[in-house]
Image (cartoon, rainbow, N blue to C red):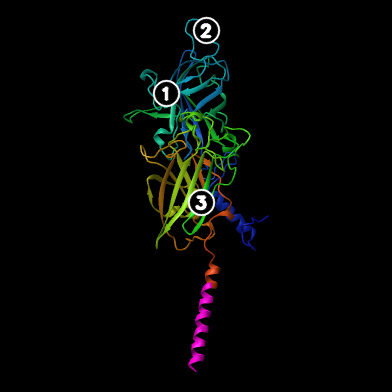
């Protein structure tokens, strides 16, 4: 069967050639967690056995957040697994288990954790130096790779006992889980890979791990939360219509249950709202028609001869949440011609790198985030609960138009979650060109009739 996107009359050999070209440029992974704007996104957990001990080994566990724009914020990640045998954790650096478990079978020295399924968390900033390792002690916060790669890595060290002391006797753990702190991530099985190599500080000697295995975890917004978390509204200078977020996007106001949302004009607002934090508490949102914690507004502001300008406003309607290190990802065909971004950081993303190089796809995706110590913290609902910036684009005469919603984004993500867009038929439209044509024709006819009248009277 011929694909529907090919022209009529295309031969089977041409179809085969195009498909071969497509798959030679890139490969697609079939998974429910697939993200079209970040197709290789994952968190990779690398477990390196550094040395053997009398009854087990010492290992360094490192987490790499290879997601371009999805980060883990406070209160941070929680990593769990199930031991394959009767292993115990004698000691840890850079992290700790949440429970010790039943260690009654041990006399003398007591292990750090005896649970069959331990749960590990990061140490908080300011932990004693003798409990730290490199890339630890950030309270479980992992920044996005594109936003800050230096802080997108976390590590801890553990001494494992009752585990075996050779590559043939050690068994890899099973059933890895990653919570942030809620659900959303699904981890695959641990796979033994080529041992990691390490270089000394002077780069003159290389050592390697005794044994290494990797675990890959991917994110699904549907698993994380069944309802959307953000929405998009639109407006433009050429139309007075403001297209709001669709009604009940993230839920509906429950008239029968007071407390489902907060009226910002309530005289007792302070007594209802608890102090905001960086933790992922259940949202308490301002009463709106959309009931979303976050709204992104895209306004087409101005146009010049060779440029056009838009304004982006991100508003926080959640009284219980301060969003630190927030980011915004926008897909629009004119992002390959960004001229200037005011008061936000900007970085182009290339989600289709293989197709871009192979078939000439344009860069149409950009990432925006706040300037450190200025607007990188999106505070809770209220008068100052918003951040905004303006973007200046150069017009591409071959494609630029304000017609048919071209000036509005195709897709917007906030902190890695896909925001709900208004329906296309609701977008602000250009003044009807046909009415302008009719007026010009009527004007021309009036002038012609006036000329005939003048001629008739003079004759």
Label 1, residues with CA under 10 Å away: few <14, some 14-19, many ≥20: some
Residue at 54% x, 76% y: name it. 442
Looking at the image, which residue sits at the far bottom?
A: 459
Q: Nearer the viewer, mark 3 or mark 2?
A: 3
User: Secondary structure beneath disc 2?
Assistant: loop
For this rendering, which residue is in front, 116 or 304? Answer: 304
Can you see residue 172? no
User: Secondary structure beneath disc 3?
Assistant: strand
Q: Nearer the viewer, mark 1 or mark 2?
A: 1
Magenta residues (range): 439-459
Task: Decide which of tag 1 and tag 3 comes sooner along the chain.
Answer: 1
Q: Is residue 365 left or right of residue 23?
A: left
Percent of width and height locating residue 314: 46, 43
Label 2, residues with CA under 10 Å away: few <14, some 14-19, many ≥20: few
Label 3, residues with CA under 10 Å away: few <14, some 14-19, many ≥20: many
For this rendering, which residue is in front, 393 or 24? Answer: 393
Percent of width and height locating residue 19: 59, 53
Q: Is residue 282 a member of the stretch shown in magenta?
A: no
Q: Which mark is residue 124?
A: 1
Query: For mark 3, what is the residue?
Result: 234
Dominant secondary structure of the magenta stretch?
A: helix
Q: Is residue 442 a member of the stretch shown in magenta?
A: yes
Task: Decide which of tag 3 and tag 2 comes sooner along the chain.
Answer: 2
Query: For mark 2, what is the residue?
Result: 106
For this rendering, which residue is in front, 239 or 69? Answer: 239
**Disc 3/disc 2 C-alpha distance (Å):** 65 Å
The quadrant the N terminus occupies is bottom right
**Disc 1/disc 2 C-alpha distance (Å):** 29 Å
For the residues bearing labels 1 and 2, Cβ distance under 8 angstroms: no
Percent of width and height locating residue 77: 49, 28
């Amino acid at each position: 069967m011929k694909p529907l996107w090919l022209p009529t009359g295309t031969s089977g050999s041409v179809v085969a050639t195009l498909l071969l070209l497509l798959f030679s440029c890139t490969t697609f992974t079939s998974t429910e967690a697939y993200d079209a704007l970040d197709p290789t996104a994952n968190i990779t957990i690398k477990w390196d056995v550094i040395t053997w001990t009398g009854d087990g080994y010492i290992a360094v566990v490192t987490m790499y957040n290879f997601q371009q724009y999805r980060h883990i914020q406070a209160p941070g990640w929680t990593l769990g697994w199930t031991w394959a045998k009767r292993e115990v954790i004698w000691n840890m650096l850079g992290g700790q288990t949440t429970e010790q478990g039943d260690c009654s079978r041990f006399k003398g020295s007591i292990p750090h954790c005896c649970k069959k399924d331990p749960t590990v968390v990061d140490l908080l900033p300011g932990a004693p130096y003798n409990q730290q390792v490199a890339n630890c002690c950030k309270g479980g916060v992992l920044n996005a790779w594109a936003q800050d790669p230096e802080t997108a890595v976390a590590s801890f060290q553990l001494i494992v006992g009752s585990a075996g002391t050779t590559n043939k006797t050690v068994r890899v753990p099973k059933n890895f889980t990653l919570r942030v702190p809620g659900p959303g991530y699904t981890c695959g099985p641990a796979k033994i890979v080529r041992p990691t190599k390490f270089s000394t500080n002077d780069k003159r000697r290389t050592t390697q791990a005794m044994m290494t295995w990797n675990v890959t975890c991917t994110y699904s917004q549907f698993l994380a939360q069944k309802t959307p978390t953000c929405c998009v509204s639109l407006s433009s200078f050429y139309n007075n219509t403001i297209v709001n977020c669709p009604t009940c996007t993230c839920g509906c106001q429950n008239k029968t249950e007071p407390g489902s949302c907060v009226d910002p004009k309530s005289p007792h607002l302070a007594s209802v709202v608890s102090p905001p934090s960086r933790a992922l508490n259940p949202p308490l949102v301002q009463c709106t028609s959309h009931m979303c914690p976050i709204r992104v507004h895209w306004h087409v502001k101005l146009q010049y001869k060779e440029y056009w300008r838009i304004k982006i406003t991100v508003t926080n309607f959640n009284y219980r949440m301060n969003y630190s290190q927030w980011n915004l990802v926008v897909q629009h065909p004119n992002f390959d011609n960004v001229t200037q971004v005011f008061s936000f950081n900007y970085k182009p993303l290339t989600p289709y790198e293989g197709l871009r190089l192979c078939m000439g796809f344009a860069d149409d995706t950009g990432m925006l985030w706040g300037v450190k110590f200025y607007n990188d913290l999106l505070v809770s609902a209220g008068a100052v609960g918003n951040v905004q910036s303006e973007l200046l684009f150069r017009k591409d005469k071959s494609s630029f138009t304000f017609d048919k919603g071209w000036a509005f984004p195709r897709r917007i993500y906030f902190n890695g979650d896909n925001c709900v867009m208004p329906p296309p038929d609701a977008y602000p439209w250009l003044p009807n060109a046909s009415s302008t044509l009719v007026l010009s024709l009527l004007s021309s006819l009036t002038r012609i009739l006036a000329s005939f009248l003048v001629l008739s009277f003079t004759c």
